[in-house]
Image (cartoon, rainbow, N blue to C red):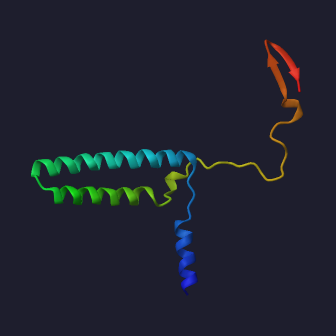
């Protein structure tokens, strides 16, 4: 029973994100934290309430966590196509021509 539950949790959180998704996640996390931090500071400053500022900051951090940590599908829009194991070499002998000063040299 516990193994099945653990396996379901693993399947739910074992998502893949691509390199573009990593870049997007970093930008989103930075932007959300900066905006929430600014709002938290301004509210705390104008209302002179540090407890409220801390609550807003912690809420924004929790929101950022929920936005970034799960592997949402929009983080995997550009999956990487890896080469097959033991497949053909990436460069064939016909492609190994080097051009230097408009002269072609074969490797």
For this orientation, the residue located farthest to the front is 50
For this orientation, the residue located farthest to the top is 101
Quarter of the image where the N terminus is located: bottom right
Residue at the image position 39 percent from the left and 60 percent from the top: 66
Quarter of the image where the C terminus is located: top right
| x and y percentages locating residue 2 in the rendered image | 54, 85
Residue at the image position 71 percent from the left and 49 percent from the top: 82
Instruction: Tell me: 69 left or right of 41.
Output: right
Residue 39 against residue 13 in the figure, above or below: above
Instruction: Tell me: 71 left or right of 44.
Output: right
Instruction: Tell me: 4 left or right of 35.
Output: right
Residue at the image position 28 percent from the left and 50 percent from the top: 36
- Which corner quadrant of the image does residue 7 belong to? bottom right
| x and y percentages locating residue 52 in the rendered image | 17, 58
Instruction: Tell me: 80 left or right of 10.
Output: right
Residue at the image position 46 percent from the left and 49 percent from the top: 25
Residue 70 against residue 27 in the figure, above or below: below
- Which corner quadrant of the image does residue 8 belong to? bottom right
């Amino acid at each position: 029973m516990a193994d099945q539950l653990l396996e379901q949790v693993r399947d739910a959180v074992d998502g893949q994100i691509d390199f573009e998704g990593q870049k997007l996640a970093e930008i989103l996390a930075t932007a959300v934290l900066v905006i929430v931090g600014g709002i938290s500071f301004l509210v705390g400053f104008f209302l002179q309430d540090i407890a409220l500022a801390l609550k807003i900051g912690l809420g924004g951090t929790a929101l950022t966590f929920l936005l970034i940590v799960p592997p949402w599908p929009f983080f995997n829009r550009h999956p990487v196509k890896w080469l097959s194991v033991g497949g053909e070499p990436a460069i064939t002998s016909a492609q190994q021509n080097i051009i230097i000063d408009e002269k072609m040299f074969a490797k």
